[in-house]
Amino acid sequence: MEGRVCESPGCEQPAKLQCPTCIKLNIQGSFFCNQECFKANWDLHKNLHKLAKSDVASQSSKKGCGLFNPWPGYNFTGRLRPAAQSATRVVPPRIPRPDYADHPEGYPLSEMKLKGNTYIRQLNEEEIEGMRVACKLGREVLDEAAKAIAPGVTTDEIDRIVHEASVDRDCYPSPLNYYQFPKSCCTSVNEVICHGIPDMRPLQNGDICNVDVTVYHRGFHGDLNETLFVGEVSEKAKDLVTNTWECLEKAIVECVKPGTKYREVGNVIQKHATTGGYSVVRSYCGHGIHKLFHCAPNVPHYAKNKAVGVMKPGHCFTIEPMISEGVWGDTTWPDNWTSVTQDGKLSAQFEQTMLVTDKGVEVLTARPGKPHTPYFMDS
């Protein structure tokens, strides 16, 4: 329990007790500073127990598998399986939120009005400063999540850290309720390409795990992600992750400046990915971002694409290549979010939000002091 803090919203006291029922049900977390805080959170907290108990009947009887299969008969492409999910976390009312946050279907109405529109906004100085702040805070949140990645830690625990770190910075975690996404970040493990939903599965030694964080702060979104190593990973996993990071770095250095066609980004990425024998996922692309979570331009990561537009100062967008060990094709789990490789082989991803300047590029989500060093290189 050393180093844990009370999970009551707004309480920063050191944790001194853990919910005994959660321990029996193998629910991670649930730390509190005293009985008063525990009782004050009981109405919300007991939902975790109900969720865990309701899944007992569905849990696998196979030795060592504390997971469950909510989709009997579904053919998984790889070895990863879903696990139980905790209750959706709550953002305090004082935190400003995007339009979809309280929509019953999670529809981003402001984005939907512009669907199909290829006009790319050039941000003014005030908007650029708003993006700088949001992206800086997003990086701080991902820093907190990256510190926690280790064997035995659940992706639900990563989500809790992301959620609380966002709220602590007066940010709304952008993924939460976006088209009804149930969590505050995406955690994509092994063969998951993107949009993995955090759950109670403990990370295992040798996994690779991408954590995708976006925060909404004072009207602007800051979006980034990195793939991290869990314990000791295989050489093939290291090679894939390294190549994926290099794909992003090369795309930024070689492409992002005034006058470059957006379609050129994919040419650079695919050229480098193929040098390692890897494939580039085609179903998901980089995107414009500012007051809207996703907007023009679309930035495909594969070669010979038909992206529309030319980079101009003031354009703000993401590049986020998803590179797979095997085939480039993807399929989606029945949860309608988790995208996995068709052959069950590994996939990795990195993402930065960047601004086109008069002279080139400003990577808004870069690590302070380590702009060209991802977390996995620290070890």
Image (tube, grey):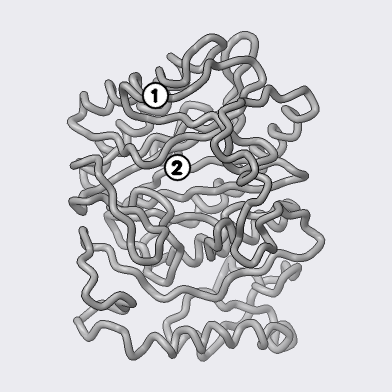
Residue 327 horizontal side relative to residue 55, left or right? left
Residue 63 horizontal side relative to residue 36, left or right? left
Residue 44: name its quadrant: bottom right
Looking at the image, residue 355 lies above or below residue 352: above
Circles 2 and 1: CB distance less than 8 Å? no
Give the Cα distance between marks 2 and 1. 27 Å
Residue 134 horizontal side relative to residue 246, left or right? right
Report the amino acid beneath label 1: Lys
The residue lying toward the viewer, choosing from 164 and 320, is 320
Res 66 visible: yes
| Between discs 2 and 1, the one toward the N terminus | 2
Residue 244: name its quadrant: top left
Look at the numbered disc 1 and give the secondary structure of its residue: loop
Give the percent coordinates (x, y) of residue 219. 75, 43
Q: Quadrant of the N terminus?
A: bottom right
Look at the numbered disc 2 and give the secondary structure of its residue: strand
Q: Residue at x 41, y 22 (%)?
A: 265
Q: Residue at x 73, y 54 (%)?
A: 97
Residue 335: name its quadrant: bottom left
Give the percent coordinates (x, y) of residue 142. 55, 47
Give the percent coordinates (x, y) of residue 367. 56, 33
Residue 226: assigned label: 2
Label 1 packing within 10 angstroms: few (<14), some (14-19), many (20+): some
Residue 306: assigned label: 1
